[in-house]
Amino acid sequence: MPCSDFSPIPDIATGDHDALADALATRGTCRILGLPDADSTHALREDLLRLTDAGELSPAATGRGEGRALQPTLRGDRTLWLDDARCGAATGAFLASLDALRVALNERLFLGLAEVEAHYARYAPGTGYARHRDRFRDSDARVISLVAYLNDDWNIDDGGALRLHLDGGAIDIPPLGGTAVCFRSEIEHEVLPAACERLSIAAWFRRRP
């Protein structure tokens, strides 16, 4: 049966920056409804599927620097950065919306966010991403993480939830198209395997190292 719209974390409407800032400050996370909007979700999904069919996505690695390595048993997605010239026009508009969100968060939380980086992420059926933090041990540049979902007609039996490990326990958030999950980058989380293809955009709001 289809997933419900229930979420165990605060639901924030797109554009309600005060509520978003409050949720991040008090809870560390929230879900943003309507991000991307319906037209953008469709355009981004079609672009990601086009790139997938063309073989333009690459296996994602874990770690960085000398510790960077492909570990498909830990991380199974294939990715392409949104500022890559191979991406379609929809990515430019979405990156602009993320940058506007960066400015709004700086105005309210004084986080010193200097830039946004984002990539497409396509998980084949049966793949996931083991428990981890987006903030690297030797760098605090990543401050806020955001995952936007591009899936169409996702069903609860498909799996693929984002599991956040919060102080009060773990919560699972289904990857419903047209929603995004925003959380502090030090929060541990994982992507549970799905029975079907899982499409998303992963983004990070960064300060200068």
Image (tube, rainbow, N blue to C red):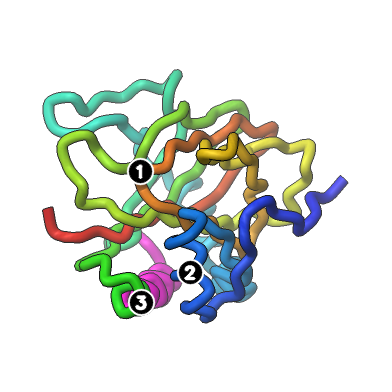
Q: What residue lies at 50% left-to-right and 46% top-to-bottom? A: 53
> Above or below — where is 182 with respect to 79?
below
Q: CA distance from mark 2 to mark 3?
A: 9 Å
Q: What residue lies at 27% left-to-right and 51% top-to-bottom? A: 142
Quadrant in the rendering for residue 115: bottom left
Residue assigned mark 1: 186
Determine contact: label 3, label 1, CB under 8 Å: no
Decide if residue 77 is on the left or right side of residue 106.
Answer: right
Q: Main secondary structure of the magenta part?
A: helix
Q: Circle 1 — which element? A: loop
Quadrant in the rendering for residue 139: top left
Amino acid on which the number 1 mark rests in the picture: Glu
Residue assigned mark 3: 108
Determine contact: label 2, label 3, CB under 8 Å: no
Q: CA distance from mark 3 to mark 1?
A: 20 Å
Q: Nearer the viewer, mark 2 or mark 1?
A: 2
> Above or below — where is 29 with respect to 112?
above
Front one among 148 and 140: 140
Quarter the N terminus occupies: top right
Q: What residue lies at 16% left-to-right and 36% top-to-bottom? A: 138
The percent coordinates of residue 162 (x first, y second) are 57, 42
Decide if residue 95 is on the left or right side of residue 166.
Answer: left
Residue assigned mark 2: 22
Question: Which region of the structure is painted magenta?
Answer: 86-103
Q: Earlier in the sequence, mark 2 or mark 1?
A: 2
Q: CA distance from mark 2 to mark 1?
A: 17 Å
Amino acid on which the number 3 mark rests in the picture: Arg
Q: Circle 3 — which element? A: helix
